[in-house]
Amino acid sequence: MKSTNHILDIALEISDQAAELIRLSSQKIKSFKSKGEVSNLVTQTDIEVDKLIAGKIKESFPEHNVVSEELGSKNLSSEYTWYIDPIDGTNNFVHNYPSFAVSIGVYLRSKPIVGVVYDIPNNEKFFALKDGGSFSNDSKISVSNKDRFSEGLYVTGFIPYDENYIEKNLQVIKNINLNSHGVRRLGAASLDMCHVAKGIVEGFWEYNLQPWDTAAGNIIVTEAGGTVSNENGSQYNFDKCIVVSNNKVHKDFLKIINES
């Protein structure tokens, strides 16, 4: 069995290679198409990076499961599963808006053990190892110490074409805006979670995310001292709603979400 440290080392190496490919593509005219909805975009770079990451995982860990946004699932009945988002924030990438990342999360028996999120425009690499802490470019990070919800800053995201959740989320945004320092939306869930881990925002929530959106951020937040749950306060297991906080404001955070 490979050590968790070795898995992290490989994940970091892969993220570097993926980031370089994305940087090169950023300098070119981007071709893209919609995946069913006008704002649900995929670029050729997404596909190329997905193939690169999956191929590198296969070289080092041929027996591991891989779940990726663009190439789907490869289930080999392993206890290890890699969740890949080649470009989290594809719409931002297409428009050169500086908020997109490579996200790689590794789970062992349904529990996160390694996470890497590479914020490419800002050249900031977040990573975490089970029981090893969370880091940003080799500096250890931790969630904020604010314990008053009203003094916090919060981030969210939502799928513009998903009518099942957009109205509800707009109400949540309204109520949090009225009871805090405000709400921001950057368009990349993995980075939103890392910003909680870094302590520059107090909380993040979103509906209807996919496993590759949150797998890496989950362990980066928890190893930084934060909390990741569903809207009922139970352990998050790729549920329909994710709620992330510095832990100190989590109870009030859940209350506002559920009362909205």
Image (spheres, grey):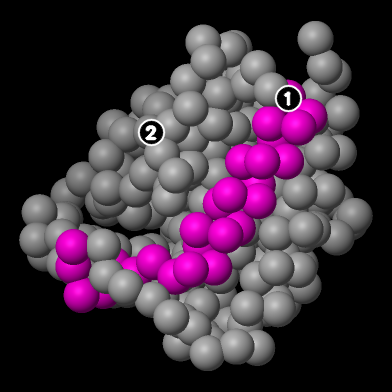
Q: Position of residue 143 (x, y in %)?
A: 67, 52
Decide whether the magenta segment is chiefly helix, strand or loop. Answer: helix
Question: Which of marks 2 and 1 precedes in the sequence?
Answer: 1
Residue 94 sits above or below residue 71 on the image: below
Q: Position of residue 183 (x, y in %)?
A: 39, 73
Q: Which mark is residue 238?
A: 2
The residue wearing badge 1 is 61
Work out how far the residue at label 1 is from the one at label 2, CA to CA, in angstroms. 24 Å
Q: Which quarter of the rendered picture does the C terminus lie within? A: bottom left
Magenta span contains residue 54:
yes
Crowding near the residue tagged with mark 1, few <14, some 14–19, many ≥20 C-alpha atoms within 10 Å: some
- Residue drawn where x is 18% and y is 67% of the image: 37
Amino acid beneath label 2: Phe
Direction from residue 109 to residue 21 in the image, left or right: right
Q: Looking at the image, can residue 127 be seen?
A: no
Q: Which residues are magenta?
A: 36-61
